[in-house]
């Protein structure tokens, strides 16, 4: 059970934001682990901030390791309550799994280099080469998977200009059709790519669809500074910066065609 730690914050504890950044998880994930009883902070400061101890970090490692092994939340809960659990065997298993992935990555690199060399000599990759590459890709599936978001706009070129100018995202590639109209655009938020797709019979911009069915959330370093710059660039603000109960500060805006965007940063509490 957590308790309040009087006086100054101890140097061997971590606030939730600091722990999230160090462990490569989100503040929302740590809040979720708290809510379901997987990981509760050992203490709280006088100001009410969660303070995680070295034992809590050890427990978080166990949770993340078991998640990587595809254990369910219920299975993880049972495993964490196992009194004979030891970190040594878990690390050994983690080493075995990491070595397997490194081996698969090395073989995939070799297969791709072989195909690239062949292509430089006008040799089309053989069926065995392609099957070999796909086999190694399957082995790496959980570690190489990524996501690409797709947003629909009536005017892709104008959308790319707006998003880069107003929100500060990085502009990417553009593909044009025979008439010179942009049929595909890209913007990048950190390592995440967002494709901009032209509207059509099956795909509609919120401006013509009468509403939206999703939203895009972008992590930023300073929500208030980002909000200030976006307003100066002409952003249509729908929600001013606010601290949310799930441990984040964020603001919301609609772009020129009605897509919803939220800019978000974790807070320590």
Image: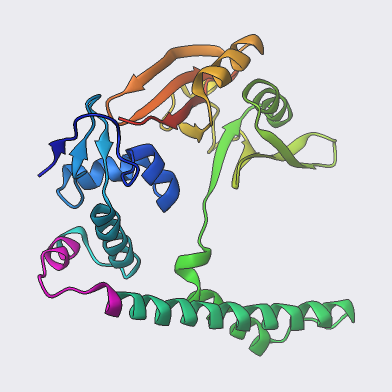
Q: x, y (%) of residue 163?
A: 65, 27
Q: Residue at x 52, y 51 (%)?
A: 147
- For image coordinates 56% across by 18% down, the residue present is 225
133 up-or-down from 44: above or below:
below
Instruction: Report the magenta stretch's main SS.
Output: helix
- Where residue 108 appears, as percent x and y from the top left, is 62, 79
Residue 168 image offset from top left, x and y in percent: 66, 27
Specify whether 179 is left or right of 149: right
Residue 78 located within the stretch drawn in magenta? yes
Whether 138 is drawn above or below 40: the answer is below
Quadrant hosting residue 137: bottom right
Residue toward you, 214 or 207: 214
Q: Answer left or right for 23 relative to 71.
A: right
Q: Quadrant of residue 35?
A: top left
Q: Quadrant of the N terminus?
A: top left
Q: Is residue 129 within the magenta segment?
A: no
Q: Residue at x 45, y 13 (%)?
A: 238
If the image is split into quadrants, where does the C terminus sit? top left
- Give the extent of the magenta segment: 75-89
Q: Quadrant of residue 200?
A: top right
Q: On screen, 206 above or below 94?
A: above
Horizontal side of 122 relative to 12 (left or right) equals: right
Q: Residue at x 88, y 77 (%)?
A: 120
């Amino acid at each position: 059970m957590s308790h309040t730690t009087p006086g100054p914050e101890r140097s061997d504890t971590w606030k939730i934001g600091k722990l999230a950044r160090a462990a490569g998880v989100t503040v929302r994930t740590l809040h979720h682990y708290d809510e379901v009883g997987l990981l509760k902070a050992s203490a709280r400061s006088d100001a009410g901030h969660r303070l995680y101890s070295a034992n809590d970090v050890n427990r978080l490692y166990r949770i993340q390791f078991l998640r990587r092994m595809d254990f369910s939340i219920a299975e993880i809960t049972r495993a964490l309550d196992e009194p004979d659990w030891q970190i040594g065997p878990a690390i050994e298993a983690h080493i075995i799994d990491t070595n397997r992935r490194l081996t698969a990555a090395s073989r995939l690199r070799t297969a791709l280099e072989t195909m690239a060399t062949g292509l430089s000599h006008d040799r089309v990759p053989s069926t065995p080469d392609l099957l070999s590459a796909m086999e190694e890709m399957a082995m790496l599936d959980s570690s190489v998977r990524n996501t690409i978001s797709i947003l629909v706009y009536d005017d892709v070129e104008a959308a790319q200009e707006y998003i880069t100018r107003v929100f500060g995202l990085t502009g990417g590639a553009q593909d044009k059709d025979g008439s010179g109209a942009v049929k595909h655009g890209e913007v990048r938020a950190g390592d995440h790519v967002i494709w901009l797709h032209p509207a059509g019979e099956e795909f509609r911009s919120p401006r013509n669809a009468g509403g939206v069915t999703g939203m895009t959330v972008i992590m930023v370093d300073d929500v208030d500074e980002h909000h200030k710059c976006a307003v100066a660039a002409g952003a249509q603000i729908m929600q001013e910066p606010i601290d949310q109960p799930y441990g984040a500060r964020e603001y919301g805006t609609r772009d020129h065609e009605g897509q919803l965007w939220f800019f978000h940063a974790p807070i320590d509490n």
